[in-house]
Image (cartoon, rainbow, N blue to C red):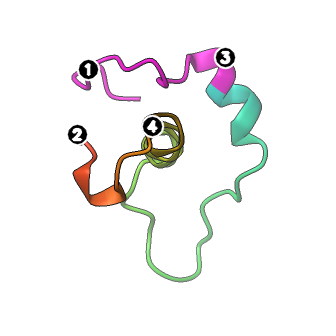
Amino acid sequence: MEATTPAYPTRLSETQWATLAAYFAADSPLGRPRNTSLPAVVEAILYVLRAGCPWRMLPW
């Protein structure tokens, strides 16, 4: 996770992300490489669920 991103109440700790990371597929040699941080996506989803704000109004 990026150190420059401000801390939000829904921010995942390294331990929490390590627990969740097992549920996501590893990078595949086929197709385009992933250019989005999975922890950032999960944190954004948690932020929307908690704050109830529209997806496009995320502070990222």
Question: Please, what is the three-letter code of the amino acid marked with disc 3?
Answer: Thr
Sooner in the amino-acid sequence: mark 4 or mark 1: 1
Question: Residue placed at 78% from the left, 48% from the top?
Answer: 23
| Residue at horizontal 47 percent and vertical 23 percent from the top | 11
Magenta residues, start to end = 1-16
Q: Which residue bears the numbered disc 4?
A: 47
* Secondary structure category for the residue under label 2: loop
Give, as a three-letter code, the residue at label 4: Tyr
Mark 1 residue crowding within 10 angstroms, few (<14) / some (14–19) / many (20+):
few
> Mark 3 against mark 2, which lies toward the viewer?
2
Alpha-carbon span between mark 3 and mark 4: 18 Å
For label 4, the SS is: helix
Q: In this figure, which residue is indicated by the disc labeled 1?
A: 6
Asked if marks 3 and 2 touch (Cβ < 8 Å), the reply is no
Is 22 on the left-hand or right-hand side of 53? right
Viewer-side residue, 6 vs 53: 53
Earlier in the chain: of badge 3 and badge 4, it is 3
Q: Give the mark toward the camera: 1 or 3.
A: 1
Work out how far the residue at label 1 is from the one at label 2, CA to CA, in angstroms. 9 Å
Q: Amino acid at mark 2?
A: Pro
Q: How would you rate the neighbour count of disc 3 (Cα within 10 Å): few for under 14, some for 14-19, many for 20 or more? A: few
Q: Earlier in the sequence, mark 1 or mark 3?
A: 1
Q: In which quadrant is the C terminus drawn?
A: top left
> Between marks 3 and 2, how big is the CA–CA gap?
24 Å
Please tell me whether residue 14 is drawn above or below residue 1 in the rendered image.
above
From this view, report whether residue 28 is shown above or below residue 13.
below
Task: Name the residue tied to disc 2.
Answer: 59
Mark toward the viewer: 3 or 4? 4
- Secondary structure at badge 3 equals helix
